[in-house]
Image (cartoon, rainbow, N blue to C red):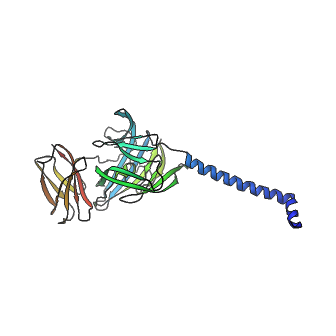
Amino acid sequence: MSGFDVFELINPLKFKLYVMKKSVLILVLMMHFINTSSKAQTYFNFPDSNTVWNVVGSNVFTQQEWHFRYAVFGDTVIDGVVYSKVYSMYDSTLLHPQSTYFAAIRENEDKQVFCLLPDFPEAMLYDFGLEPGDTIFYNIGGGLCYGDVMLWPQDHYKVVTKVDSMLLLNNTYRKSWMLSGSLDFQTWLEGIGSINWFGLFNPLISDIALCGDSYQFACFKQNETILYLDNPFCDHCFCSLLTGIKQQSTESNNGMLVFPNPASGSFKVGIQTTPSTLNRLEIIDLTGRKRVVQLFIGNETSSSTDWMNQGIYIVRVVDASERVIGMSKLIIE
């Protein structure tokens, strides 16, 4: 060791600065480790009360705006299992008499969220224990058009491409998942769900209908606190108090008309889009079976109900590119 090196080590001031720099470096590394660990270790359960998911949409042709607001109110026991009840809200946050029951959801100890929709068996909605490369499978599919959500039996899946974290408006981090599927990439947030397109129930959406609609998950509000906000129409969670939400109906308003509905004997299907000789009509029962597949020529066709049992069916018109251009529920009496 040179004399200069010895001098550097025994110089009290420089030695003190040397120790302080090392201490600061160690402290920074420890804080980073603690911060990273806290992000990974804190788990946020899926909401079971005081929560609203807000979805907004619009139609490029009609300039109409759509609103889907889902909120958790109360519990219910189905086959011995406790679920939280999800309502499609008429009001922003209050359980209005015109609010309608939409589904039941529950979370198990494995961080899996299940939903129970009317006319369907229980299905997994989220799995917050997934790692990159994992796959989640669904047997319920659906689509959105002209402010209506339609669901039907359909197999599809999503693959986790990345796991990360996201900072929310209350300065807390939530674990995030990016997934690829049949439509596009989407992002899930722990304790919130999907922050894309149809929000809470977006994992079930399997088809995009070509009716001019576009949707966006606008807001997540829990315990009167806005945690996530991405509203294209205003800088609030809700741009207005009363929404005039269009409830699910057996009457289609998505560019296709099925009449009469309910039907007995026969019914007609009409579309508003430019007719194509390659369009086809599909009628699907609630087990997922295609009961009718026929060419749809022009803007209107008819079909008999003689072969159909009483119940609910999904009517779809599909073009040559396998794109859904119209869909509706059909009730057979």
Query: Visible in this render: residue 206?
Result: yes
Q: In this view of the protein, which residue sits in the foreground, 83 or 252?
A: 83
Residue at x-position 63% and y-position 49%: 34
Compared across the picture, whether 79 is left or right of 226 comes to left
Residue at x-position 16% and y-position 55%: 269
Give the position of the N terminus as an image quadrant. Answer: bottom right
Q: In this view of the protein, which residue sits in the foreground, 104 or 58?
A: 104
Compared across the picture, whether 175 is left or right of 218 comes to right
Compared across the picture, whether 29 is left or right of 118 comes to right
Give the position of the C terminus as an image quadrant. Answer: top left
**Residue 28, how many percent across, how many down?**
68, 54
Q: In this view of the protein, which residue sits in the foreground, 18 or 250?
A: 18
**Residue 101, how many percent across, how many down?**
32, 40
Q: How many marks?
A: 0
Query: Visible in this render: residue 150?
Result: no
**Residue 95, how many percent across, how many down?**
37, 38
Residue at x-position 26% and y-position 65%: 321
Compared across the picture, whether 92 is left or right of 4 comes to left
Residue at x-position 43% and y-position 42%: 51
**Residue 3, how many percent across, how many down?**
89, 66
Q: In this view of the protein, which residue sits in the foreground, 228 or 81?
A: 81
